[in-house]
């Protein structure tokens, strides 16, 4: 994970200011947003991550916007052997990754928009947009693990590629918690949490806040 200092951020901002006047938007600059995936349902601290490359220019930074507001400037340079294998001739494809930690719990419940804009040293840029949903899980940072109990889980079952735990207690409140395999992180993640209720029949997988018609 990259950590931006004030000096680094100022330097990147100055470089960006000079570069954006040079060339303009270039659709050959490829940007991939791996996490969160489109319309993901989130309620935890996670990452905005992916990769960006250009056939013959060096991609150096991405800017991240949430709901149209600037959120973060992130260097591109994470090791990505898989991208190198897929695009062996693209400039610096081995070091095309970017990642930024985000506390999604701090955002308002409901849908949000995201835009990632990538820039090359030479001045080209391109952008992608996506959406995600914050599912209304507790917005407080859980510092005491003893407030979490799995002993209250009434049952669990599988649906799609997920495991659902019904009745997980977090700070004296109960939730249904869905664990899903995430290819980008190569591990199971909490995709959504909803206030506890008994699931009668098939699990819809959709958060009622994010999909109120379900």
Image (tube, rainbow, N blue to C red):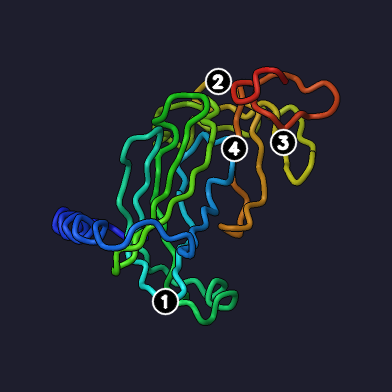
Compared with 81, 15 (above or below) is: above
Of the two numbered discs 3 and 4 on the same chain, state the one appearing first in sequence. 4
What residue sits 43% from the left and 44% below the top?
A: 115
Q: Nearer the viewer, residue 11 or 167?
A: 11
Q: Are marks 2 and 1 in contact (CB under 8 Å)?
A: no
Residue picked out by circle 4: 39
Q: Residues within 10 Å of mark 3 (few under 14, many from 20)?
A: many
Is the residue marked by circle 1 packed among few (<14), some (14-19), or many (20+) residues within 10 Å? some
Question: How far apart are labels 2 and 4 at the CA level?
Answer: 26 Å
Q: Which residue is mark 2?
A: 173
* Residue of label 3: 164
Q: Earlier in the sequence, mark 2 or mark 1?
A: 1
| In the displayed structure image, the side of residue 143 where residue 148 appears, left or right | right
- Answer above or below: position of 61 versus 44: below
Q: Which residue is mark 1?
A: 56
The label nearer to you, 3 versus 1, is: 1
Residue 169 appears at what percent x and percent y?
Answer: 58, 27
Q: Are marks 3 and 1 in contact (CB under 8 Å)?
A: no
List x then y, in percent, for residue 117. Answer: 39, 52
Q: CA distance from mark 4 to mark 1?
A: 32 Å
- Front position in the image: 116 or 146: 116
Q: Name the residue at 39% across, 31% down.
A: 106
Tell me the quarter of the picture where residue 76 sits: bottom left
Image depth: mark 2 or mark 1 in front: 1
Tally of marks: 4
Give how far apart the Cα atoms at labels 2 and 3 are.
17 Å
- If the image is split into quadrants, where does the C terminus sit? top right
User: Disc 2 and disc 1: Cα gap in Å?
Assistant: 53 Å
Residue closest to the eye, 158 or 100: 100
**Measuring 51% from the left and 34% from the top, which residue is drawn there?**
43
């Amino acid at each position: 994970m990259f950590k931006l200092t004030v000096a680094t951020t100022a330097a990147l901002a100055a470089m960006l200011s000079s570069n954006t006047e040079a060339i303009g938007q270039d659709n050959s600059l490829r940007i991939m947003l791996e996490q969160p995936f489109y319309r993901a349902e989130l309620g935890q601290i996670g990452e905005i991550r992916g990769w960006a490359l250009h056939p013959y220019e060096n991609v150096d930074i991405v800017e991240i916007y949430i709901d149209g507001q600037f959120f973060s400037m992130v260097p591109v340079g994470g090791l990505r052997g898989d991208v190198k294998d897929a695009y062996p001739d693209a400039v610096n494809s081995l070091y095309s990754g970017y990642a930024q930690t985000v506390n999604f719990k701090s955002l308002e419940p409901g849908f949000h928009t995201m835009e990632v804009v990538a820039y090359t040293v030479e001045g080209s840029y391109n952008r992608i947009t996506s959406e995600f949903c914050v599912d209304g899980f507790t917005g407080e940072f859980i510092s005491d693990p003893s407030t979490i109990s799995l002993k209250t889980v009434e049952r669990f079952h599988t649906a799609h590629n997920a495991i659902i735990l019904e009745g997980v207690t977090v700070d004296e409140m109960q939730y249904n918690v869905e664990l899903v395999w995430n290819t980008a992180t190569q591990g199971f993640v909490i995709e959504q949490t909803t206030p506890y209720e008994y699931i009668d029949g098939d699990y819809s997988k959709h958060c009622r806040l994010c999909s109120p018609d379900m």
